[in-house]
Structures are given as structure tokens and as C-alpha cells.
Amino acid sequence: MTNSTTIYQDYKFDPKHPEQLIPYLTNNNTSTNYKISILRIEGALTNVIYKASLLDHNGISTDQDFLIRIYDAKNDNIIDRENELTNLKRLPESFDKIKILFHFQNGRIENFLNNYRAIKSNEMSEHHNLRKIAHRFKELHSLTNLTPEEKQHYGSNGKKPKYHCFCWDTIFNWLDTINQYRNWLTERNNENVCKNLLCKDWSTFKRIVHNYRDWLVINDSDSFKNIALCHNDTQHGNIMIERDTDNKADIIFIDFEYGGINTISFDLANFLTECMNDYEAEDSAFCDSEKFPTSTQTMHFIKSYLTYLEPTDLNQLQQKQLYNSLLKWRSSSQLFWSIWAILQSGELNNENIDQTGRFQYLNFAQSKMSLFWNDMIKLGIASNDDCVIERVRDMELNLL
């Protein structure tokens, strides 16, 4: 896999002057030998993505296409780029289409996957796609080796898990960050917490979050033993499907910015919750509970995952346990991305940001939190008095 660590610190991409990128794409050939065209690709939530095409001096395509990924400065304190690159370098062979060519001040260049497109939201839960997506997850989780340091930090001590994992470690770090913005948290009688987290106050919210994690430790302890390198962000823009009309089209995952050592239950449950979002829709921040995969679809996904790479008889108990685990963990995904959205919004610093064409982070958080509280109440972790109950949306949660 070619994932370069080369960094051009002297270059910063400017979409108004894409020609300045040509020497870096062509081994320092002058821009007079080539021309370049760029096209912005919509659908990314934080980074800005362009397709760059090299043209000869007559403006004819050279069949050399690149993906320009411009980082969101707000992600600098959230994403560990060095860790991302390390993870990309150790992915299984089935992920070898992901190639980083070089980095620059505000982003990087990747190969452009001309034969692939982002999967549509409504295609994610189709029978044949669920199977192939499950297979990719299994390859990622089973064929990527953990380092001794990762095993020491995240692994089980004998039979007892340590209860560390990427999602919960990150959630608690983010809570500590938000905790510093006391004015935002207490402004106008907890208005921001009530409006965006659907909770009566910040202390109650933190208590419920801790109680939820403790509940998982008690009621789904085995999930903390099943850790692996996980993608953690398989929204439809990060799942690429081959440009083929039949059901044999290949599927790969891209964009490992949030990759980390996590429970497989979070990774799989996060995918299921992402089926509810369509980031190309007019209301791209809305989380539609009606689109959550049915029990039949979820079980097909689980069976495809469990049986792939393991030519053994299907264990009915194992299916049931993983099914229940994914339902128990799905709110950790809603929680994770809701807190992320608060941090991304710029509201904590009262930044005066032009919202024209910008993803509606706070609406996104509110939509996800309305389903988070549904699960907290149904699992007995929270009560109606803990949240803004009139804004909580009903969603089935039927454990087997």
C-alpha cells in the first residue's frame, strides 16, 4: 500500500489558484506543460474535497485524476493525523486501493477512485450491500494486527476486560473539553444544554453518560473483550461502491480519520445508525429512525459478518448476543457524534460563522439526541425527568 509520509510544508492549497499544485503532481514539471481542472465534491461533513484532473497544454485530459482533501482547522484538536497514517499503512490487502500520495500544509493528495462512487444512503441497507459491507468490517477487524502497546492498553487482563476503547475514551475527553465552556453551559438557565443535548442541565447529562457506560460494562461486558482496529465513521460518504450495476460490485471503506482501537460492537452499531442519515438530502442533519435497518436486515448483516472468514457452523447464541450488543451500543454512536457536532459548531466560542451552505451541526446533534434519550429511557438508564421528554422521538428497541 502506498501511503506516503512526504510533506510539502511550503505549499498550501488555494482553490482560486489550483495551478500552483501542478509541480507537486508532476515531479516539478512547470505549470506551462500542464493545466489543471478542479471540481468540488459535495457531501463531506468537515473536510473540503476536490477532484483534480491534469490536462495537457492543449486542455486534453491526461487521465491522471487526484483527490484533494482540505482539512477543517477545527479538526486539528480532534484528529490525530499521524495515527491515521499509521492505521492506513496496516490495513488488510482488500483496502489497498486507498493511497495517499503526499501531504501539504492544509491537506493531502490521494489517488482518485474513478471506478468507484460513494454509496447512496438508501443503498446501505440493501441485502447484497449489507453482506459486502459486513465482509469489509470482518476483514478490517480480523486481519489487522494490534501492536503490543495497544493490546496492553485496550486488551483483557486475563479474563477481565479493561473497559478502554476509542469511543468512550474520546467521549470523556470531549466532555472535559466542553466542561471548560461554563458560560455556554449555563447561559440563560441551561438553554444551550436543553436545546442541543435535550437534557435539563449539564451535570445531569454527564451523570447519564457515565451511567450509560457503566451500564454497558455490567450488561454487555463481553463487548469490551472484542476489540479491534475499527473505522468508527462508516457514513455513506465513506463507503465506496464500484461503478457497476450488478450485485457483484466491490465495496471499500475510505477516510480513516476517526479510526482507532474500539469495540466491534460500536463499529457495527455505528454503521447501522448511519443508515438513518442522508448527507445529500436537503435536510442533511436529520436522523430518520424509520431508516434504521429492520431486525431481519440487521440479522442478515450479523450472519454475514460472523460467517465470513470462519468456515464454521453458525452459532445461534452468538448471533443473538451480537444482535443485542449492537442495539445496546447504538446510542453510544448517537452520543459520540452529537458531542462531536457541538465541538464542530463553533458555538462554544461564540464564533460568528457564516452558516450559508454549512452543515447544520446543532440540528444534527439535536436529531441524534432525540433518539439517544429514547434508548436511555427504554434501557432504564434515564428517566423522563432527566431530559426534554417532549422532544424525544420513539424508536423500537427490542432485545432478543
Image: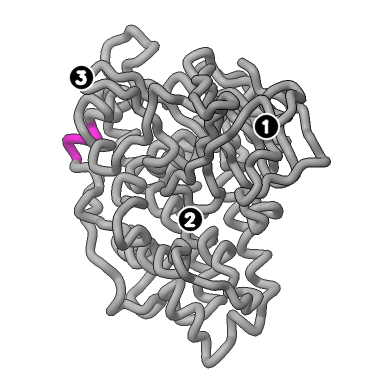
- Residue of label 2: 337
Residue type pointed to by label 1: Ile
Residue type pointed to by label 3: Asp
The answer to whether one can see residue 141 in this image is: no
Q: Tell me which numbered mark, 2 or 1, is placed earlier along the sequence.
A: 1
Q: Mark 1 falls on what kind of element?
A: helix
In this rendering, the label closer to the viewer, 3 or 1: 1
- Residue of label 1: 22
> How far across and down, in percent of the image, does residue 113 sit?
46, 25
385, 238: nearer the viewer: 238
Residue type pointed to by label 2: Trp
- Residue of label 3: 246
Q: Residue furthest bottom?
A: 188
48, 98: nearer the viewer: 48
Q: Is residue 274 magenta?
A: no
Q: Residues within 10 Å of mark 3 (few under 14, many from 20)?
A: few
Image coloring type: one colour
Q: Mark 3 falls on what kind of element?
A: loop
The residue stretch that appears in magenta: 295-299
Q: CA distance from mark 3 to mark 2?
A: 33 Å
